Amino acid sequence: MEYDQTVVDNRQYDTRGRRKRVRTKGRMDYALLLIIMVLTAFGIIMVYSSSYYTASLSSSYNHNPAYFAIRQAAYAMMGIVAMVIVSHIDYHIWYKKSLFRIMYFTMIILMALVFVFGIEVNGAKRWIEIPGIGVTFQPSEIAKVVIVLTLARLLYTCYRKLNDIRILLAICAIVGVFIILAGIENLSSAIIMSAIVGIMIIFAVPRWKDIGVLVIIAGVMLVIIFSFKAYRSDRISEWHNQDVINGAVTQSGAAISAIGSGGLFGSGIGQSLQKMGTLSEAHNDMIFSIICEEFGFVGGIAVIVLFVVMILRMSNIVVNAYDLYGSLIVVGVMAHIGVQAAINMAVVTGVSPNTGVPLPFISYGGTSLIFLFGEIGLVMSVARSMMKE
Amino acid sequence: MTNRSDKQKRKKRRVNARMLKRLAIVVFCVFGVYIAVVVALANYQIKDTDTYKKSALTRQDYSSQTLYYRRGDILDRKGSFLATSKKIYNLVLEPKNIIESKKFKADDEHTYQDITIDAIDKYFDINKSELEDVLNENPNSFYYVAKTKLTYEDVCDYLDYAKSDEGKYLRGINLEENYEREYPNGSAGCHLIGYTSAGNVGNWGMEQQYNDTLNGTDGRRYRYMDESGAIVTEMKNATDGNTIVSTIDLNIQNIVDKQVKKFMSSVGAKNVSVLVMDPNNAEILAMSNSKSYDLNDPYNEEYLQMISSDAEIAVASSEAKLQALNEIWRNRAISDTYEPGSTFKPFTMCAALEEGKTYDGEEYYCGGKLHVGDWDIKCHNADGTITIKQAIAKSCNVTMMQINEKLGAETFTKYQSIFGFGQYTGVDLPGEASASSLIYNAENIGPTDLAINSFGQGFNCTMIQLATGFCSLINGGDYYQPHVVKEIRNSEGGTVETIDKKLMKKTVSKSTSKLIRSYLKEVVDSGTGTGCQIPGYEIGGKTGTAEKLPRNNGKYLLSFISFAPYANPEVMVYVTIDEIALSPQDQTSYAVHLARNILSDLLPYMGIEQVKVKDEDEQKVVNVNENGTAVSDTGDKASDYLLNTDDISDTTDNAVSENADPNQATTEANQAQVTEAQVTEAVATEAIQ
């Protein structure tokens, strides 16, 4: 096993004599960086294209057609800054017990605060406002990163005991808190979190039997959440009923119309008809349908290819990471982005039932975008200390 | 965890082959979803793209709903509704949603669909089998218009039900709100008000003239679901149109309509038009044409019977029918031009008084005819030596011709223009004619033309032109722009604009105005208009009996222009009767009587102060019916018309004498285009002084 040629082992041991992990002078993964930048830039353009009509109509956006696009660009800037900072920090810093504990409990408090101080939008509390500056954010988006870091640490430390179902149950309970807290108000976030946890466990746990047991337990939990949240069932029946009162049509129906009308090469940028009020959340969860309408089959495939390449690049980092902790982090991030993109596109194309998840890097949304960049920062940090076999 | 074990494990803690295998499985699962997405995209975008293109377009219609604005009302000057917009509802069903609602149970026995179907049956009278047909035929539709123009009374039970506990199970029933134009008074003032077609497009009258003012802007409602599936509504509210307050007085309009109808049923004519104005500001109080129509039903072909026989209607093309309907819709009082006849004499007289060419008390001699140019132009009777006051009272043509001779072509045409003839009055109604090509100017008027112009023959005008000019003669010389709208209000009732009287020019001096009023009073007191006497009121007026072109055909336009009270006019009534259904036609007393009938209702309604009735006057009134049979060759009904009302005097003031066929140039419809040769000829043969 050889280190990268530029290895600088400047902090071999700490004061307690514990050996510090070797820091290598690896490189950022520039291919991955390019993909992220292309997706983000494309996202800003599409947010503009899909929102200018509704934004210019609405007084709450000052009739400014670029309202969403400008904000999205600003979020992207903040995200890039976050990414650069995180990528230059040794990812083992997140492993530190003190920081880990602060992170974990702060997150739980934040998610609990949503129920107390949450801003209710359309019947669901998801946002909290930072007092004084009026900035709102979605704790559930942050929780996705925290879950990745938490689970990576737990699986890494308990590496040898992963055959013990009790240990596995304990680990799941620790991260399950987030899923339950998120699931109360935000089912789609809970689904993404479950997928992250599931994939990381499949990746790390040796025995399929244990994985099976965990999946069954998770399934039971999910059913319980469903039945407790009566209002959500209502909303789901509303979906099935396809009745949006007074002549409006369903979101996915409109999305499929949009996609179908795009044809092979699309109607051209800015030419989407469906964003003119028919398709709600055109700049948000349903942005993929506008991409497909304006850029056609070719545009849709291009976006999918970008995500595929992104996953392959991350897989490469997983394989070559300096240690398992790094690999686990990257697996978690990959699961988050890959699954979220898959669910989003599957919903839009009618492959899966409707649940609102944004398309990573493309859909409008500040918290989501900034923390996605943060996650890429983590991946880059792992990539920088990559080992060459 | 000890440091040692940590160190020990560190080497081993890297990804192993099993993990890489698991990674591959997970990655392939995710890619599997991507492939499914690609397959779905290919399916929609390559295979079925045409279907979806259409679907994307049709979806536009249902996704957002138009919120219709309310067109503003038209009120009369007292606040009564002349036109209003009533809310109506269209029942729009969403078959797809009704079909889907079968899946949901409201209770153990009923699904949402059962409740919906029952409600549609109960509240909208569409039974189950009818509804099933609709659902089967349009299973994928979100927009099926089941019923239109339901009133609030029709739907209020349903609205209550929809709000009840059970109402939440209803699916796919949608009431679309719209407005329908309603004219509460039917045909009253139809030519002034106009009607709307194609929703909110005004046709004729104020509806057309003030179309943009009355109309508002549609709003729009967008409904969609957000990421959580909650329904979000975005509204852009409609802006309702403005209301206009007209100068019309509905009561006066009804009085006029009633009298016109009465005249038409008992005597009849090709057309009767009446114009009532306030001389002090040229506000139009009422306007009536005998060919009226119900504003709520403007396209009814029964109206065509007023102008054509049934046989003609049966074979007429739809284009011809529309053209014929246009004849009924048009406002003759402002669109039709005609030779005014003797009602023009006060204008000639005022011009001469203003210019000092004559003076109060000046005498002229009328020998029954006057030789002008090549022609002898007759008066209806040889009046002998008369003052100018008597000339107006007796409607003496010869005196007027002599006065006009003194006035000269230049001054006469200048005054014609000052009085507004040949020009648009600018009344705020569509379709006004100016008659500018049917009037002479100083260059092309010959001596014969000048002579006959003096008593209102040989040139054309519109009723509104003559009436507006006449108002200025009697109100002290102020020529106001005639108008039918006095105020514009917004939908909340706040005043947007007040349209005050608009002084256009001064026509005559106060003293001339006073003189002409006294002359016009003499017409009613002792002249050709005695039929218009109403006990207690001092009324002035002037008759007109214009022979229509071509001359010597026995066709006449009878008219009477009147005002009251004499000293301080508050109302002006102008009546024209085109081709009365009598033989001979030149019986101007009918116009006088129509005006009298209108005034006798109108003056008390307007609260115009009465003067003390002298015994003598009463006596006269009692006697009127005794000499009321002067009219011959008329049907009984027609004679009754005069008998029932008031006295008859033979007031025919024949216009053009027939001893020679008057110069063709003066009688062509296009009189303005007099050839040079004819002018020279007319000038060469000097008229008598």
Image (cartoon, grey):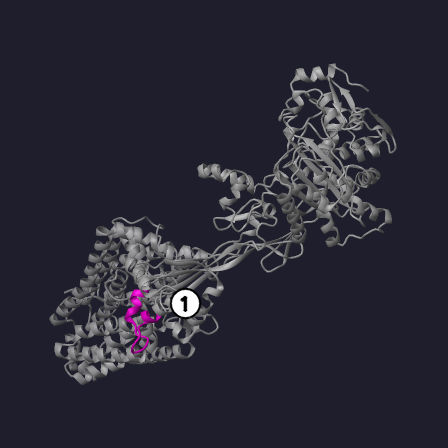
Quadrant assignment, res B335: top right
Q: Is residue A238 above or below residue B93?
A: below
Which residue is nearer to you in this view: A162 or B535? Answer: B535
On the rendered structure, is A244 left or right of B506?
left
Q: Is residue A212 above or below residue B493?
A: below
Identify which amino acid the numbered label 1 is placed on: Tyr
Magenta-colored span: B98-115
Q: Position of residue B160 (x, y in %)?
A: 45, 71
Answer whether residue B107 is magenta in the image: yes
In the image, what residue occupies the spot 21% across and 62% down? Answer: A311
Q: Position of residue A336 (x, y in %)?
A: 26, 68
In the image, what residue occupies the spot 80% across and 35% down? Answer: B393
- Which quadrant: the C terminus of chain B? top right
Q: What is the crowding at mark 1: few (fewer than 14 residues within 10 Å), some, or many (at least 20)? A: some
**Residue annotated with mark 1:** B123
In the image, what residue occupies the spot 78% across and 22% down? Answer: B370
Q: Circle 1 — which element?
A: helix
Which residue is nearer to you in this view: A256 or B2? Answer: A256
Which residue is nearer to you in this view: B2 or B360? Answer: B360
Answer whether residue A162 is magenta in the image: no
Quadrant assignment, res B640: top right
